[in-house]
Image: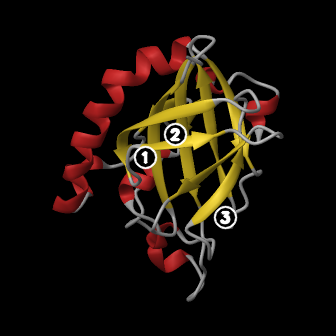
């Protein structure tokens, strides 16, 4: 929510050890950290400056697989953060489609998309893309796959993520008219 007022790329954001303090949350709390994949929690910090401020020595073996995601993020991070990073979709609520768009040039950039706990696996997400544009989206990591979208009159594109509480990072390029 701060990204409307402060450049997201300047905010230091901590991601949680979702296995720690699980007993501190009420049973059945859908927003308890234990209900989120560790990679998803890490990805929520990628539009800012990620901090893994935790006792890493107490992480389970599974958490170490997140190292590959972080390596992939670090390869695109300079290009992502050199763009203008703006919020897209709905305001995060735990039940929305939300994310960030990095505008790196007039016709290229990145979209970091989050499907929170929502019923639909497809949604029109409001972006900063020009109405009527045709956009190729190359899947970089997370859920999702390579796709093509036509931007609606309000700047929205239809995107798909099969799993609740999942994310995807795409590199996009606006297709030039021939």
As helix, strand or loop, the secondary structure at mark 3 comes to loop
Q: Are marks 2 and 3 in contact (CB under 8 Å)?
A: no
Q: Is residue 145 above or below residue 88?
A: below
- Judge whether 126 appears above or below 49 on screen: below
Say above or below: 55 vs 21: above
Contact between labelled residues 1 and 2, with CB atoms less than 8 Å apart: yes
Mark 2 → mark 3, Cα distance in angstroms? 15 Å
Question: Which of the image's four quarters has the N terminus?
Answer: top right
Q: Residue furthest bottom?
A: 27
Q: Say whether disc 2 or disc 3 marks the residue closer to the N-terminus.
A: 2
Element type where label 2 sits in the image: loop
- Mark 1–mark 3 Cα distance, whole angstroms, equals 16 Å
Front residue of 45/109: it is 109
Q: Image point 60% across, 32% down: which residue?
A: 134
Q: Nearer the viewer, residue 110 or 19?
A: 110
Could you classify mark 2 by the number of other residues whose Cα lies within 10 Å: few (under 14), some (14-19), or many (20 or more)?
A: some
Image point (42%, 41%), residue name: 53
Q: Residues within 10 Å of mark 1 (few under 14, many from 20)?
A: many
Question: Which one is earlier in the sequence, the residue at label 1 or at label 3?
Answer: 1
Residue 86 rendering spot, x and y as whole percentages:
70, 28
Where residue 61 appears, x then y in whole percent? 16, 60
21 left or right of 66? right
Q: Residue 42's mark?
A: 1
- Is the Cβ of the residue at disc 1 closer than 8 Å to that at disc 3? no
Q: Is residue 140 in view?
A: yes
* In the image, residue 151 above or below residue 96: above
Q: Label 3 belongs to which residue?
A: 94
Instruction: State the residue position of label 2.
Output: 45
Find the distance from the CA under tag 2 to the CA under tag 1.
6 Å
**In the visual, does 66 lie left or right of 32?**
left
């Amino acid at each position: 929510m701060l990204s409307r007022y402060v450049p997201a790329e300047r905010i230091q954001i901590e991601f949680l050890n979702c296995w720690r303090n699980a007993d501190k949350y009420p049973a059945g709390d859908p927003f308890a950290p234990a209900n989120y994949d560790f990679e998803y929690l890490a990805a929520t910090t990628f539009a800012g400056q990620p901090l893994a401020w935790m006792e890493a020595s107490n992480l389970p073996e599974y958490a170490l697989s997140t190292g590959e995601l972080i390596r992939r993020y670090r390869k695109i991070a300079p290009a992502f953060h050199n763009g203008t990073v703006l919020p897209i979709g709905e305001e995060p609520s735990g039940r929305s489609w939300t994310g960030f768009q990095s505008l790196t040039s007039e016709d290229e950039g990145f979209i970091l998309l989050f499907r929170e706990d929502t019923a639909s696996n497809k949604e029109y997400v409001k972006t900063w893309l020009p109405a009527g544009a045709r956009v190729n989206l190359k899947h970089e990591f997370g859920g999702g796959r390579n796709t093509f979208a036509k931007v609606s009159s309000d700047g929205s594109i239809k995107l798909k993520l099969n799993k609740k509480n999942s994310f995807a990072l795409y590199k996009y390029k606006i297709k030039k008219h021939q």
